[in-house]
């Protein structure tokens, strides 16, 4: 048994078998090894080649019956290639000379061979270069514990623990269907979209394992402690026993929280707050209502655009939004498209090349205002769907008054178009803005005068305020919602909204973090939006808080410059 450490996100404990996934386009990582590890690494390489040979032989035996002579020749050639002693010799030499891992040595050997083949004039011989990379790819898959011929999701079983270098939000959506037990990734931070999705799936995840996953292979038994960020690999009976008991306790506590589901979210001094749900998919409305969310405070519509080659048109979006609104009388805040940065799509319609620094690039409202053919169908669909329920439209990433000017012009155009076309819509839908750029937080009073509501997006606000990439595991230890700069910005947004007499909510992950609940209440926040799985926990904290007692402590917190005192005050608040 050994342990790996990363950043724990998501929910509770999972015990299950590892399933290593290497995406076809994923680069093979390079790791340094010590001179004394060379022998062991060459043995890994030899074992990898051996299992690839066995696997290919079985696979080809099965195919042999039904295939032609030409196919036989290709299969034989592949088997010869994988068994070629030069492949082992050259890769072992690279391991010895460059002190690198076996997968990477194979990669370098493959690139050397491909360079030779590329220079050959004969097109037939040149085409062999692809076959080399296929054969070497199979050995690399074996080294990573993933069997030849298997697509990344093929054969994945319920409860298995997905172990991979990185997950795009689009991948995570796919895994949702497979009811996997947990995620482990080398990259990512606590508020990366993988983390947010893992929480919404109520499964644990550990991100930011750095190079940790290289020590795992498919089939290893793993215990995932999502709270502490610890992975126990091949645990002994004693560890299994402890964690099985812990998992049972978490289930019990979760059941106990059920009891307060239908109790009001009212503080000890009688202030009632709204606890809304964040959703990624319209189908999550059901779960949110089961958790008794006051409404939907954030529907991230990006999922509609992911894992497809085209973008959804107005009709498709109208269908989704109107069905959603029709299914509840509670308020539903739908956020317009927030593509870009960490939320890339693979839809082929537009050439959305990666900016040098995507988080600071043309994302969210910037992208939408730049490309009205992308934005208008969504807005038309939203306006048309508005007659089916209590809709609020929310715009992400606004940072200047010019953007608001442009937004209002587009909204006027949409209303004019729909009127001309005799299509029904509600003329006065509340339109709000997400405050997630420090510039918008500092000038929140200006936004508050022109918008119907504000919602604080702390995931991005913290990223931009503290200059910490939210998906970079190397700096996520600095990601701190309780940093005084963040708290001061949050306070100024709440004050601005209150002065303008408009509602203000918070929909970043901070809203669902019980370590922050009392502080936010003392700062004046009365509307929270979070993953529905944490609503009961936050409600329990709200019900145990006397805001009047918290206010002087939080005032102190915002002004102290002594870090020890700061920590003591936080402890006192959450005590
Ligand atoms: C945020 O930035 O806080 C937010 C809610 O938006 P997202 O996490 O989708 O960027
Ligand atoms: Mg955001």
Image (tube, helix red, strand yellow):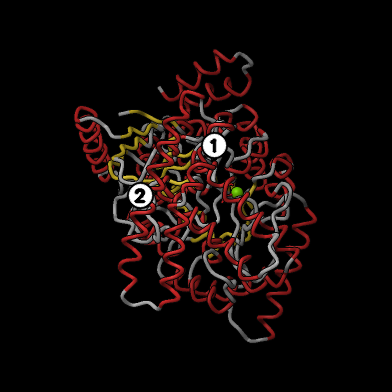
At label 1, counting other C-alpha atoms closer than 10 Å, the crowd grade (few under 14, some 14-19, many 20 or more) is some
Q: Residue at 45% across / 19% down in the picture?
A: 572
Residue 93 - label: 1
Left or right of residue 238: residue 359: right
Left or right of residue 492: residue 74: left
Q: Residue at 38% across / 47% down in the picture?
A: 145
Residue 122 - label: none
For label 2, the residue is 51
Q: How far apart are the alpha carbons under marks 1 and 2?
A: 21 Å
At label 2, counting other C-alpha atoms closer than 10 Å, the crowd grade (few under 14, some 14-19, many 20 or more) is some
The answer to whether any part of residue 276 appears in the image is no
Q: Position of residue 447 (x, y in %)?
A: 71, 50
Q: Residue 63 occupies which quadrant of the picture?
A: bottom left
Of the numbered discs 1 and 2, the one sitting upstream in the chain is 2
Taking 504 as reference, is 227 above or below it?
A: above
Q: Nearer the viewer, residue 146 or 135?
A: 135
Left or right of residue 346: residue 450: right
Q: Position of residue 348 (x, y in %)?
A: 62, 69
Q: Nearer the viewer, residue 307 or 454?
A: 307
* Callout 2 secondary element: helix
Image quarter of the C terminus: top left
Q: Nearer the viewer, residue 272 or 357?
A: 357
Q: Position of residue 450 (x, y in %)?
A: 72, 55
Q: Position of residue 274 (x, y in %)?
A: 45, 48
Q: Residue furthest right?
A: 402
The answer to whether any part of residue 136 appears in the image is yes
Q: Residue at 59% across / 77% down in the picture?
A: 314
């Amino acid at each position: 048994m050994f342990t790996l450490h990363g950043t724990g996100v998501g929910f509770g404990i999972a015990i299950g078998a590892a399933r290593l996934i290497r995406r076809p386009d994923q680069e093979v990582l390079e790791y340094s090894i010590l001179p004394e590890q060379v022998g062991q690494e060459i043995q890994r390489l030899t074992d990898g080649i051996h299992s690839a040979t066995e696997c290919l032989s079985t696979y080809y035996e099965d195919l042999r019956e039904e295939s032609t002579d030409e196919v036989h020749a290709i299969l034989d050639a592949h088997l010869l290639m994988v068994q070629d002693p030069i492949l082992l010799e050259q890769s072992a030499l690279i391991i010895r000379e460059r002190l690198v891992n076996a997968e990477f040595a194979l990669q370098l050997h493959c690139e050397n061979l491909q360079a030779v083949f590329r220079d050959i004039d004969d097109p037939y011989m040149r085409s062999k270069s692809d076959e080399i990379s296929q054969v070497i790819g199979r050995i690399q898959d074996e080294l990573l514990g993933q069997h030849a011929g298997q697509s990344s999701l093929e054969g994945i079983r319920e409860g298995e623990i997905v172990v991979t270098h990185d997950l795009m939000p689009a991948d995570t959506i796919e895994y949702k269907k497979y009811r996997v037990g947990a995620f482990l990734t080398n990259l990512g931070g606590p508020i990366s979209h993988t983390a947010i999705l893992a929480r919404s799936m109520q499964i644990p995840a550990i991100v930011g394992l750095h190079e940790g996953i290289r020590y795992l292979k498919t089939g290893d038994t793993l215990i995932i402690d999502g709270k502490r960020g610890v992975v126990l690999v091949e645990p002994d009976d004693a560890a299994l026993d402890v964690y099985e008991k812990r998992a049972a306790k978490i289930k019990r506590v979760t059941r106990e929280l059920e009891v307060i589901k239908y109790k009001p979210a009212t503080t000890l001094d009688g202030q009632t707050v709204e606890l809304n749900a964040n959703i990624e998919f319209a189908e999550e409305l059901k779960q949110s209502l089961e958790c008794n969310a006051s409404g939907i405070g954030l529907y991230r519509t990006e999922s509609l655009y992911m894992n497809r080659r085209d973008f959804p048109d107005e009709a498709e979006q109208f269908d989704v939004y109107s069905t959603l609104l029709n299914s509840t009388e509670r308020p539903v805040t739908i956020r317009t498209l927030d593509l870009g940065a960490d939320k890339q799509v693979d839809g082929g319609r537009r050439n959305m090349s990666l900016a040098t620094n995507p988080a600071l690039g043309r994302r969210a409202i910037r992208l939408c205002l730049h490309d009205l053919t992308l934005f208008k169908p969504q807005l038309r669909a939203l306006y048309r769907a508005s007659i089916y329920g209590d809709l609020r439209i929310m715009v992400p990433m606004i940072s200047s008054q010019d953007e608001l000017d442009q937004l209002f012009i587009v909204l006027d155009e949409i209303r004019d178009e729909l009127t001309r076309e005799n299509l029904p819509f509600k003329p006065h839908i509340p339109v709000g803005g997400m405050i997630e750029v420090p510039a918008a937080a500092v000038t929140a009073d200006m936004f508050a005068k022109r918008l119907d509501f504000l919602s604080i997006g702390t995931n991005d606000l913290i990223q931009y305020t503290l200059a910490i990439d939210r998906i970079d595991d190397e700096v996520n230890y600095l990601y701190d919602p309780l940093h005084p700069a963040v708290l001061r910005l949050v306070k100024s947004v709440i004050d601005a909204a209150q002065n303008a007499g408009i509602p203000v909510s918070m929909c970043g992950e901070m809203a669902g973090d019980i370590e922050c609940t009392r502080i936010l209440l003392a700062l004046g926040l009365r509307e929270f939006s979070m993953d529905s799985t944490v609503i009961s926990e936050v409600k329990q904290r709200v019900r145990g808080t006397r805001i009047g007692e918290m206010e002087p402590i939080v005032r102190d917190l915002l002004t102290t410059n002594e870090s020890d005192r700061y920590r003591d005050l936080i402890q006192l608040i959450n005590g």
